[in-house]
Image: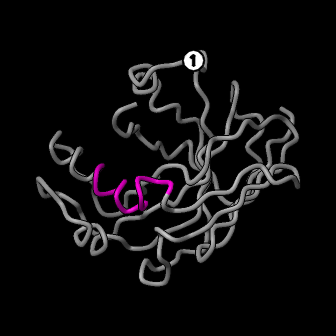
Amino acid sequence: MDEPIWGVLYSDKCRTDGDDIGGTGLIEPRVEVEVAVVLGADLDKGRHTVADVISATAYVLPALEIVDSRIAWDITSADMIADNAGSGLYVLGTRPVPLAAVDLRRVEMRLTVSGEEAATGSGAACLGNPLNSVLWLADAMAQRGTPLRAGECIMTGSLCPMQPISDGDEILAEIDGLGTVSALLSAA
């Protein structure tokens, strides 16, 4: 893919730290560890700077994206867009962290699945800094006439390669400075 892809985060697909996400109709789920940015102000200029993004950020949270394609996994970027960026569910941590308290570029993360280390990564893996992802999306959406608005939650992109998950898995991610977020994929 030659540019980031994006989709819509629907409120009925949002889950909370510790939730059981089994029985939600997932087909072939995979997990990504991400930083969620919640906006406190609109990003409605034609072009933005990282300073605009910083000023507009209310807080950040650790998050999981449960990626689930309704198309066979050998897919193109056009397939991903048609499939709402492969969005299945997203799980948000519950302890908001002010952006000034953490350097998102330098955060390290660890993902365990059923007690086994599955992946590690860093904030730099997300376009060099998760704030760059928000900046790109803010510009892209403003150019489409649908700017990002206060109160919206932005999933910035994975800090590690996505990992397959299956029934019975306990998923736990820890992001330095942001805390933990977890989910259980119980058998349906």
* Position of residue 37 measured from the top left corner of the image (x, y, whole percent): 43, 63
Q: Is residue 138 above or below residue 145?
A: below
* Position of residue 158 measured from the top left corner of the image (x, y, whole percent): 54, 49
- Residue name at image x 23 percent, y 45 percent: 141
- Residue name at image x 13 percent, y 58 percent: 45
Three-letter residue code for mark 1: Asp
Q: Residue at the bottom extreme? A: 101
**Residue 113 appears left or right of 174:** right
Q: Which residues are magenta?
A: 125-137
* Position of residue 62 measured from the top left corner of the image (x, y, whole percent): 59, 64
Element type where label 1 sits in the image: loop
**Residue 116 appears left or right of 108:** right
Pick the front one: 13 or 96: 96
**Residue 185's image quarter?**
top right
Would you name the residue on which mark 1 appears?
A: 74
For the image, the number of numbered tags is: 1
| SS majority, magenta | helix
Pick the front one: 94 or 103: 103
**Residue 52's image quarter?**
bottom left
- Residue name at image x 69 percent, y 67 percent: 180
Coloured how?
one colour
Query: Which corner quadrant holds the C terminus?
Result: top right
